Image (cartoon, rainbow, N blue to C red):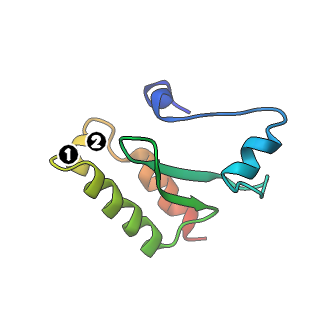
């Protein structure tokens, strides 16, 4: 995970069975993404490869939770490198 994204990620190594069970992360061979609102409630949860519809839904939730903040501001100066890599991986 690039350093500029560290404040937005939690990375866990080792045994975390209780934590995984609580947030329903039962598959150890896939990645999970969670979108939290301002008070820590899970507003979106996904795992595995995202479909185009799921990506659109996630973007819609982000826009709903961050009024006045446009996606172009989030990626300004980063050229959407991570997004294009993620999208190319989901179309296999």
Q: Secondary structure at mark 1?
A: loop
Name the residue nearer the viewer: 33 or 2: 33
Q: Quadrant of residue 90?
A: bottom right
- Position of residue 83 relative to residue 52, above or below, is above
Of 70 and 82, nearer the camera is 70
Which residue corresponds to the image point at 70% horizontal and 50% vertical from the top-left?
22
Up/down of 41 relative to 11, above or below = below
As displayed, is residue 82 above or below residue 2? below
Q: Residue at x 22, y 48 (%)?
A: 72
* Image x and y of residue 9, in percent: 53, 35
Residue at image coords 31%, 63% = 60
Residue holding disc 1: 69
Q: Which mark is residue 86?
A: none
Image coordinates for residue 42, horizontal then vertical, percent:
49, 52
Q: Are marks 2 and 1 in contact (CB under 8 Å)?
A: yes
| Quadrant the N terminus occupies | top right
Secondary structure at numbered mark 2 = helix
Find residue 74 and name its label: 2
Q: Where is residue 89, by image quadrant?
A: bottom right
Residue 19 image position (x, y, % from top left): 73, 42
Foreground disc of the pair 2, 1: 1
Residue 53: quadrant of the picture: bottom left
């Amino acid at each position: 995970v690039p350093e500029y994204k560290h404040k937005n990620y939690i990375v866990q190594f080792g045994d975390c069975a209780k934590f995984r069970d609580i947030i329903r992360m039962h598959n150890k061979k896939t990645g999970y993404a969670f979108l939290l609102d301002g008070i820590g409630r899970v507003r979106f949860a996904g795992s595995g490869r995202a479909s185009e519809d799921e990506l659109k839904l996630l973007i819609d939730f982000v826009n709903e939770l961050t009024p006045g903040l446009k996606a172009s501001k989030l990626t300004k100066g980063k050229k959407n490198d991570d997004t294009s890599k993620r999208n190319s991986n989901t179309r296999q």
